[in-house]
Amino acid sequence: MTDVCPRCGARYPPGRFAACPRCVLADVVGLTLPEGFELLEEIGRGGMGTVYKARDLRRDRVVAVKVLSRELAEHPEFSKRFEREARTLARLRHPHIVAFHELRREEDSASIVMEYVDGPPLSSRIPMSSQEALGVADQVCDALAYAHRHGLVHRDIKPENILLDGGGQVKVSDFGIAAFVEGSPRRQPLTVTGEVIGTPEYMAPEALAGASPNPRMDVYSLGIVLYELVTGKRPLGYFELPGPPFDQVLRKALAADPARRYPSIEAMRRELNPPIRRDLLPAGDPFAGGDTATERTWLHAVALLQAVALGSALTLLLSGSIRGRPALATLAALALGALAGAWLRRRWHRRALSRAEPDRPVRESDTLFRFGVCAVLIHVAAGALAWQGHAWLLAALPVVERTIELPGLFYFRAACLEAARISRPLDREPWLWLGLLLLELPRLLEVLGRLGFRL
């Protein structure tokens, strides 16, 4: 149930407001919530407007609505810039960037409707452990690298504009003062050269001087955020670096001269990860920021569960009998394996162990290929011996093949889970699919034989 305002027709939760919040905003504050949205609560306030948690009644979803002040919305130049910016941000679709839904314009106001992130800003988690800071910084780098590839500089990176959702994933928000890189082919700039805009405490020296937008400005701002995450304070005046392994990264990211800074956020990310991980984790460890033995154990446990379920399903399908208790048990095992996989991915997200490393091969693929070759060789050898009169070997062949198949399926599922963790497309793992084909080739030949085909 909701209360309905007789003046404007807006709906709002009963018992939470003495008067219609939409009308109060319009009359007192000079802000107007767009029509079709139910106000839930205020979640943020800044110089450009106020952000509210609201329900989109048309789509029945919770969203965040940033309502701009009437003065800014009525300013012709700001209005044009705001609309150009909204069209640009609508193209930014990235898992670590708050999703932009729509721009709403009323008679005397403008609003941005965006994804609602059910989690606190990064500022509420300062300071944090080195491992957590690494995970956060890596995800922010991923988001900024994506924006920079689209020609956009955020220009206001600070803890308040970095949100953490319920799964511990980073969501970079507030691209409200983002600007195109000078010389970008993307239409005309969103801001005027020489305009100083942003949060001074997190701005690069050249940004404070009114220089044209450049990705190195975001590098500097992220350096301040990283310093604050590790030390609990901002690097004001003369400050000491937190020591290895952060000192070398922060020294370069916080260089006052842009030419001595990282040339791109990708360069900062590359240097941030490997040196730090060598100091914090065992050499060659793929789990950045986590207990290697524990995380590897969970990965193997879930992969084994899924392998057993998958093997049972294959046996059931090839037997031609998909009814009765075995079928129900197999379906239960498949469901349990799927739930375990979802739990493991959520665990990785919460511990910031999910990485965007699509160029790193999955080592389990090579192991699966070896098992596939072994399965084929055993099948060929058994067939050759049977042809020479040792037919009794054919009776033991299925047992041997199933013994090889189970560890092969285990490595297949482990490879799939690891590929999901590092965002590695499975179509870039040819040895994985070739190994699976070879592993299941004996079963395939068995099915073809039943159908009357002979090789």
Image (cartoon, rainbow, N blue to C red):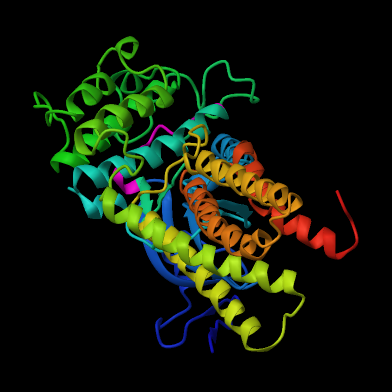
Classify 261 as above or below 240: above
Does the stretch in magenta take in 123? no
Residue 239 visible (yes or no)? yes
**Where, quadrant-wise, is the N terminus in this rendering?**
bottom right
Give the answer, above or below, for where 17 lies relative to 410: below
Residue 210 as seen in the image, left or right of residue 230: right
Q: Is residue 421 left or right of residue 376?
A: left
Q: Position of residue 299 (x, y in %)?
A: 40, 56
At 43% from the left and 66% from the top, the residue drawn is: 343
Q: Main secondary structure of the magenta part?
A: loop
Q: Nearer the viewer, residue 13 or 453?
A: 453
Place of residue 159 in the rendered image (x, y in percent of width and height, measured from the top left)? 30, 45
Q: Is residue 206 above or below residue 350?
A: above
Confirm whether residue 167 shows in the render: no
What span is in magenta? Answer: 151-160
Residue under the point 59% across and 20% down:
184
> Farthest residue toward the right?
452
**Residue shown at the point (64%, 20%) measured from the top left:** 185
Where is residue 105 drawn, in percent x and y? 62, 54
Coordinates of residue 340 in the picture (x, y in percent):
46, 68
Number of residue marks: 0
Q: Is residue 153 magenta?
A: yes
Which one is nearer the viewer's eye here, 170 or 194? 170
Look at the picture and state if 238 lies above or below 315. Answer: above
